[in-house]
Image: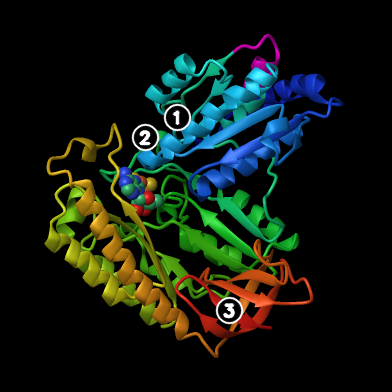
């Protein structure tokens, strides 16, 4: 199990690079800019990247034009995400042309793929380094290489990537926090690139996670999301009887007023112990359970290891344990071979479960995954038409569910002033519904009660 973790010797080696970079950077007012694409896992990784950058002497900036180092944290989940990443990297050519000392680095799921790493090395000469998702702890070394003689470094992750504990973190928010509890994925859903770019599942030690949550609670964090590609299989690789339910029970003993969210879960591992633990006081009354398709035949082709009966059985148990639990899901339309009947089954499940919201995706072929070469790829027009029908159906359900909240008093966590209107504040309920309200006083980072007065598909409106 110890080989799950980056060795102390390697961490010490990086610490010495930290010192060397500091000598080159400190006192020169050097600025760092980090851009994050993709999911919450990347958001959490970027908080570690910012932690490392500040610890080696950079000051963070929101202005890429004046940055001395730019890091692009990329996503590869769909083709569009990769195109976007490449176009963003492309625009930094001008930064390098203006100031040849600018360091440009790429990390995340896109650069974890060998063909992309090669492409960055050979076609993007202004990129100083590109690394995989499990090599973030080596940033000090890569930055040193770039600053010292301009050496370019292109690193793919080890065959068996490890967890680096003790990396500094600069959190984006003062009241919402991500806590990675595990990394990687063992599931190999046939459409998904993640297992190829994030390696196999590896869990952090329960004591490290619990201490981190305790510190966050002490520092006034109010919404803590336990992150992993499939948090339901947390602990399977650890010695000892650890699982996600154990973690939730231990976290529930921590003093403080906070919500715990889980992101994300796989239905095949949603145990009764977990469902029971969700009713602990600290757990938000919300569960995200990716469906992907309402057709058991599609689920089989997707290698999901559950059928619709099993999925709906879990939903029934969740609703029985907590009748007003908010449910959200992920659905892919247009997987190879998806017939009209298969798609109708997806619509039926959406009607039956009545999710609070659904993240809908058009299937995107990912090179290297089994679905890439499956027969009966669905034409774009059909995919788009299905995507729109599914969204229309869910939008009706979301609006109806939101309208049913009118007149109710809900507890929200306030995020701050709305971007578009100075007088309006934005907040979220424990099920992540957005609530706007007017206020003279600034309650950012606090829980308050709001009476809902108006609702539409995507937001609720109310008064204190
Ligand atoms: N195409 C479309 N959607 C995908 N997802 C993962 N891979 C693909 C793909 N190739 C979706 C799944 C997953 C979510 C994070 O992204 O629904 O749950
Ligand atoms: Fe991808 Fe499936 Fe793993 Fe989720 S569980 S990251 S969809 S392979």
Q: Is the C-beta separation of discs 2 and 1 under 8 Å?
A: yes
Q: Mark 3 points at which residue?
A: 461
Residue 112 - label: 1
User: Within the image, what quadrant is residue 175 found in?
Assistant: bottom right
User: Within the image, what quadrant is residue 419 found in?
Assistant: bottom right
Q: Give SS at disc 2.
A: helix
Give the extent of the magenta segment. 142-151
Mark 2 CB near ligand 2 (8 Å cut)? no
Q: In the image shown, does 189 or 346 lie closer to the viewer? A: 346
Q: Residue at x 44, y 73 (%)?
A: 457
Horizontally, is 267 left or right of 36 in the view? left
Q: Where is residue 188 in the image (x, y as percent from the top left)?
A: 30, 42
Q: Position of residue 254 (x, y in %)?
A: 66, 66
Dominant SS of magenta comes to helix
Q: Give the CA distance from mark 3 to mark 1.
A: 42 Å
Can you say which quadrant of the picture contains the C terminus? bottom right
Q: In the image shown, does 141 or 237 lie closer to the viewer? A: 141
């Amino acid at each position: 199990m110890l080989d799950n973790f980056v060795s102390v010797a390697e961490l010490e080696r990086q610490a010495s690079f930290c010192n060397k970079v500091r000598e080159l950077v400190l006192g020169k007012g050097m600025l760092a800019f980090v851009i994050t694409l993709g999911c919450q896992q990347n958001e959490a990784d970027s908080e570690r990247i910012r932690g490392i950058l500040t610890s080696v002497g950079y000051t963070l900036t929101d202005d890429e034009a004046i940055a001395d180092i730019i890091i692009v944290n990329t996503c590869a989940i769909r083709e569009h995400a990769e195109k976007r990443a490449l176009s963003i990297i492309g625009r930094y050519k001008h930064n390098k042309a203006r100031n040849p000392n600018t360091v440009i680095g790429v990390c995340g799921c896109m650069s974890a793929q060998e063909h992309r790493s090669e492409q960055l090395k050979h076609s993007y000469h202004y990129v100083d380094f590109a690394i995989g998702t499990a090599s973030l702890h080596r940033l000090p070394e890569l930055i040193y290489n770039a600053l010292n003689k301009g050496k370019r470094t292109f690193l793919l992750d080890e065959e068996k990537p490890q967890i680096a504990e003790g990396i500094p973190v600069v959190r984006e928010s003062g009241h919402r926090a991500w806590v990675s509890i595990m990394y990687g994925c063992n599931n190999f859903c046939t459409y998904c690139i993640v297992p190829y770019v994030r390696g196999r599942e590896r869990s952090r030690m329960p004591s490290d996670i619990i201490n981190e949550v305790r510190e966050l609670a002490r520092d006034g964090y109010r919404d803590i999301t336990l992150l992993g590609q499939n948090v339901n299989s947390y602990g399977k690789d650890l010695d000892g009887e650890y699982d996600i339910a154990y973690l939730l029970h231990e976290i529930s003993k921590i003093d403080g007023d906070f919500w715990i969210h889980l992101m994300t879960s796989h239905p095949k591992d949603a145990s009764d112990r977990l469902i029971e633990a969700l009713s602990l006081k600290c757990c938000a009354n919300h569960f995200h359970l990716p469906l992907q398709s309402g057709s058991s035949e599609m689920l089989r082709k997707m290698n999901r290891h559950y059928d619709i009966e099993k999925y709906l059985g879990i939903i029934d148990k969740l609703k029985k344990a907590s009748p007003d639990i908010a449910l959200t899901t992920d659905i892919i339309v247009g997987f190879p071979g998806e017939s009209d009947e298969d798609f109708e089954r997806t619509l039926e499940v959406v009607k039956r479960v009545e999710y609070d919201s659904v993240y809908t995706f058009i299937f995107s072929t990912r090179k290297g995954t089994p679905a890439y070469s499956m027969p009966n790829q669905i034409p774009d027009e059909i995919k788009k038409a299905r995507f729109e029908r599914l969204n229309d159906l869910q939008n009706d359900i979301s609006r109806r569910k939101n309208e049913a909240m009118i007149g109710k008093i809900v507890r929200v966590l306030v995020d701050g002033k709305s971007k578009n209107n100075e007088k309006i504040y934005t907040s979220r309920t424990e099920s992540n519904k957005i609530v706007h309200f007017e206020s003279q006083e600034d309650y950012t980072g606090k829980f308050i009660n709001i009476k809902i007065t108006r609702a539409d598909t995507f937001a609720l409106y109310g008064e204190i």
